[in-house]
Image (cartoon, helix red, strand yellow):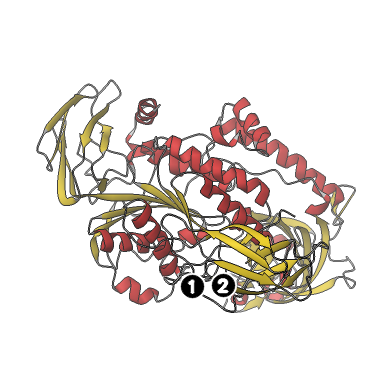
Amino acid sequence: MKSIRHIQQRLAISTAIFCAGTAFPLQAKVTFPAFFSDNMIVQRNATLELFGKADANKKVTVKASWDGQSHETKADAEGNWSVTLSTPDAGGPYRITCSDGKKTVLDNVMSGEVWFCSGQSNMEMPLAGWGKIKNYEQEIAAAGYPGIRLFQVKKNTAVAPLDAYQVTSTMGGWQECSPSTVPEFSAVAYLYARELHQKLGVPVGVIDCTWGGTPAEAWTSSQSLKQVMGYQEQVAQLEAMGFDHDRVWQDYQTKMDAWKAGMTRIDKGYRDGKECWTSNDVDDSGWADMELPGYWEGQGLPGFDGIVWFRKAVEIPSGWAGKELQLNPGIIDDEDVIYWNGEQIASGAGYNVQRHYTIPARLVKAGHNTLTVKVTDMGGEGGIAGKAEDMDIRCGKSKTLIPLAGTWKYNVGCSTADMPPVPQSPGSSSFPSVLFNAMVHPCLSYPIKGVIWYQGCANVGRAEQYESLFQALITDWREQFARPDMPFYFVQLANYLERKDVQPDSPWAALREAQSKAQHLAHTRMAGNIDIGEAGDIHPKNKQEVARRLAVIALADTYGQDIPAQAPVYDGYTVGADGKVRVSFTLPDIGEPFTANSDIKGFTIAGPDHKFYPAQAYTDGQQVIVSAPEVKIPVAVRYGWADNPECTLQTPSGLPVAPFRTDNW
């Protein structure tokens, strides 16, 4: 299986364009995938298949300075070649020299521990940039670690697996960790590497393979995804099209055209298939007002997805009449169609794209004009956003402008709730398997020690499905990396949103439970995170503690250090004659007991009526005693079961007991 995959990755690419991202001189004959570069780190005491391209049928000689042995091979008719190297124990720097008559050198190579770091935005979150983690300026200034190596995979999607030559590094290959290279790198990945580097005393490399807002299904191969309930039909359709890019996109476009036609049929802004809310003489006095820029979710349309029509009267000075104007309506989320005096003049798409359009001179008249914007939003926030100063109309080089920010009229055309689900674009980062195909699959040839994973927000609301999906993903990656016992450590979702003492229907709690079920898989561990989230920020800033908790798991579970790494795990309960519930816990083999606590926050309890109440709870040895005066016959206990619970049961080293429930209601 592994050799077939490697052969596939070395075939099919015959032009140098796919070597973009490599750091090698253009005159060099031997070229490599992006992850074979200067400053690379190889997994110590492992087998490395080094492969690349040379002139067809040329002899290639490879020598690694760690053992001085020469390895000879011959490129095939398409220039593909490979050699197998045994990597040394931790150390370096080394040099790998490759020649087919012209020499190429991979310099400053280290041998150590390599970890693959993946997931959505909380793993992607950089130290600086949009992330700005806790103490980010000090962290960046102190990030001079030449023994830590960084590789960041460029975001990409594909409906079929790409090969190793098609992966691109945003950093030009591997880089030494320094204040200049780390600011836009994954904070969790870097901080995790720093912990291991300092505790193990060996070089550590981390591969940042992340994309914010992405669901687990996008990171799972189609072969495994077709075994998960809810995805079989879609994967079967892709298989029927041979995972062919053009056929898949054509199929999507056909479905999308039909779906949009259905939207138009129910859109109140149309009559007999034609727009009826765009002309100057439309009576919009009964329309509601909205202040723009601003997303409509916070201005009278909470949770709304669909089509909203906006109108604004614009007074044009006489000197501008008959002249071409520049229209800057701001950032429109997701799609827009622009009408001026009843005639369509432009359209656009992209939730974060600043719009710039032209109003034709023939439509510009002095005095009253009407600007109409039809906005379609398929999910998440919607509307006309951005900055007020970016919304205006301009005429040539004139310093005069007409501001568009302020009060607009709006009316709802239709809601997606009245439509079948919108077809999913194969170019979306949420489309099944596309991130595995484009970002993970090309890296499978690179030996790694294990995976750390932080993802789940994008699957909140689908906990039952996620329980199977996440375990399928872990098993899938182990098979794909040809490492059935590969360590896979993940972060449970942090506390988030409004704090509530009782919230039995919490979708975030349900997703956390689905995550925890993955611990049934061997060599899989979960880092608790229920105590360091932020109510108003889905991206909590304390990534140092997240990384520390992942690192202590790795140090104990992978590297055999005798340190506490996990908190006790719920095991069972009994109800005493006094009406109190005694909750028991299992201590993981790398765990430590929790701290005595006479007033534990986070427990709720319910009786036969299934109504939960805040509970009084305290430790008794390594059990927790739970009760509430409102519940005379306790039948269920929950801990941390809310979007943003207050949880205070933890170990002396600060590891939180993860949320759990005794019921399955």
Q: Determine which of the numbered discs, if any, sits on residue 475 in the image.
A: none
Q: Is residue 558 visible?
A: yes
- Write the residue at 27% across / 21% down: 76
Mark 1 nearby-residue class (10 Å; few <14, some 14–19, many ≥20) = some
* Residue found at x 60% / y 28%: 239
Q: Is residue 355 visible?
A: no
Q: Residue at x 48, y 35 (%)?
A: 161
Q: Can you identify the residue that label 2 sits on?
A: 619
Secondary element at image label 2: strand
- On screen, residue 120 above or below 620: above
- Of 413 and 544, nearer the camera is 544
Examine the image and state in which quarter residue 347 appears: bottom right
Question: Pointer 1 and pointer 2: residues touching (CB < 8 Å)?
Answer: yes
Mark 1 or mark 2, which has the lower sequence index? 1
CA–CA distance between discs 1 and 2? Answer: 8 Å
Q: Is residue 229 above or below residue 180?
A: above
Q: Three-letter amino acid code at disc 1?
A: Thr
> Which is nearer the eye, 571 or 228?
571
**Left or right placement of residue 121 versus residue 179 in this view:** right
Q: Position of residue 630 (x, y in %)?
A: 79, 74
Residue 634: give x, y in percent of width and height.
75, 65
In the rendering, which numbered label is found on residue 595? Answer: 1
At a point 78% along the width and 61% down the height, the residue shown is 308
Number of residues whose C-alpha sits closer than 10 Å to that of mark 2, classed few (under 14), some (14–19) or many (20 or more): some
Residue type indicated by callout 2: Thr
**Image coords of residue 189 (percent x, y):** 39, 59
The percent coordinates of residue 552 (x first, y second) are: 38, 61
Where on the picture, by quarter, is residue 190? Answer: bottom left
Q: Is residue 252 above or below residue 126?
A: above
User: Which element carries disc 1, helix, strand or loop?
Assistant: loop
In this rendering, position of residue 660 left or right of residue 542 = right
